[in-house]
Image (cartoon, rainbow, N blue to C red):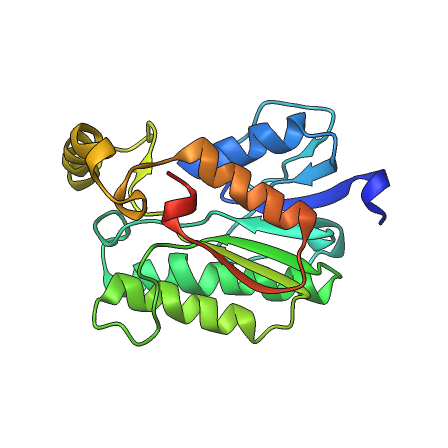
Amino acid sequence: MSAAAGRRLLLVGATGLVGRHVLAQALADPRVAAVTAPVRRDLPAHPKLRAPRVDFERLPDDAALWRADAVVCTLGTTIRAAGSQAEFRRVDHDLPLAVARLAHAHGARAFALNSAMGANAASRIFYNRVKGELERDLAAIGFDSLTFVRPGLIGGARDEFRLGERVAGVVLGALGPLLPRRWRINPAPRIAAALLDAAIGAPPGVHVVGSERLA
């Protein structure tokens, strides 16, 4: 599909903090012709939006669902919310990777991931290691354009309460102007804009957008 005709976007994680902003921005963006957002719960109707209910435990191999020009993935949880390291890995590694493989198999050529600052497959920190392993495994799929957006602390109102993030947000918010840009709070709308621009622009190769560019 030509850029003039508008991109068909697949968005996974549309009901999360960053995903909600990606969805709102994509629906308002004339560069986007249509958005498919598989979800567990219904989303408000919009002429550009298709939001089929999907069992993420058993992703359907449905060409109509996965066919898109580009993918934005904002799936993610915390170890506390997941309940175990194994479940965290399933949500933050296995599911995004399965989505990427299905979308690529059905023609998607660009993929933008909401990853994390510190993502490193060799890290001793479990969270950072899982994020890095996902980046590594996504790179092996063969997308023409692959972008990893690596925010630090994400600023915005979540549905669930995260004490650690709340405390860190207060501290970093107070110190903001004094901190290096990479350590400042990254507002969710800016992260969403970076993901959307990467998916639509689809620059060839593998790219990293660091937290200093999101502050």
Residue 11 x, y percent position in the rendering: 59, 44
At x 75%, y 56%, the residue is: 63
At x 33%, y 49%, the residue is: 77
Residue 127 x, y percent position in the rendering: 27, 61
Which residue is nearer to you in this view: 128 or 61?
Answer: 128
Left or right: 99 in relation to 129 = right
Residue 107 x, y percent position in the rendering: 75, 61
Q: Is residue 15 visible?
A: no
At x 66%, y 57%, the residue is: 203
Which residue is nearer to you in this view: 69 or 41?
Answer: 69
Q: Eyeballing the image, is 16 above or below 131?
A: above
Q: Eyeballing the image, is 24 above or below 4?
A: above
Q: Is residue 91 visible?
A: yes
At x 81%, y 44%, the residue is: 3
* Residue 105 image-quadrant placement: bottom right
Left or right: 170 in relation to 187 = left
What is the total number of numbered labels drawn onto the structure image? 0
Looking at the rendered image, the quarter that the C terminus falls into is top left
Residue 16 x, y percent position in the rendering: 43, 37
Left or right: 178 in relation to 130 = left
